[in-house]
Image: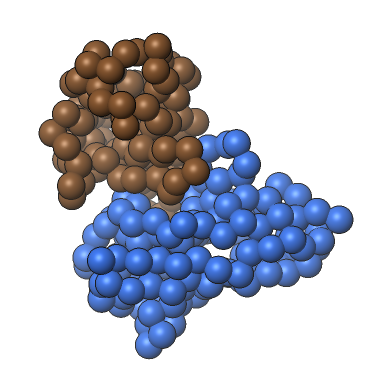
Amino acid sequence: EVQLVDSGGGLVQPGRSLRLSCAASGFTFDDYAMHWVRQAPGKGLEWVSGINWNSGSISYADSVKGRFTISRDNAKNSLYLQMNSLRAEDTALYYCVKDRGSSGWFSGYFEYWGQGTLVTVSS
Amino acid sequence: EIVLTQSPATLSLSPGERATLSCRASQSVSRSLAWYQQIPGQAPRLLIYDASNRATGIPARFSGSGSGTDFTLTISSLEPEDFAIYYCQQRTNWPPSFTFGRGTKLEIK
């Protein structure tokens, strides 16, 4: 069974940093691209960032480019999101998501989702 | 950036009825479109990918159609558990970019 366990969220002041983690199990982690998708309270879904199997292809939404860094450790079956210079508009539930394609590259479809970790940016 | 417009914003139907949800893209996405279901308090679930392919474990009452700029998600006969929010999503593989529509809330009439 695929499991994605998100962690690392919390309350943080504007301008500070936070690192999210996702522990994956139930599938061969380095066969798949991974993503972070967020959802502001009461709002819709926004793709944040994606990384292919070997970290050779990384992409970000314009809203986080230059502030967020996605990474993965295939030996630890883990995905990360380093978030710097946080803003109030970054407040959201952040989901770790497994890409559908098994080639390790982006299929662009989000097949399995973690339970999410809540990030609140406020003074 | 490709914008996805979903309609209607809210759809009120009764169990057993047929639901038709629409998603329109601001430019052609070929068949690179997916649909997700989100029950409040839960993570989204992939229903349909590549416009018309059902994801693993998705019941046959869910079907997708369309290409280019106009897409439809149809639920042939609504079950109580189908009342939720539905999102469409497009993929652009190079440079990688993925956007969602704003959602259609399917509520019990």
What is the tally of numbered marks visible in this picture? Answer: 0
Give x and y (percent) for residue B88. 37, 34
In this picture, is B102 found above or below A67?
Answer: above
Q: Residue at x 32, y 13 (%)?
A: B14
Coloring basis for residues: by chain
Q: Nearer the viewer, residue B24 or A20?
A: A20
Q: Residue at x 31, y 32 (%)?
A: B81
| B16 sits to left or right of A49 | left
Image colour for chain A is: blue
Q: Residue at x 67, y 52 (%)?
A: A90
| A82 sits to left or right of A71 | right
- Quarter of the rendering containing residue B16: top left
Q: Is residue B58 at least partly visible in the picture?
A: yes
Give x and y (percent) for residue A34. 39, 65
Image colour for chain B is: brown
Q: Nearer the viewer, residue B55 or B59?
A: B59
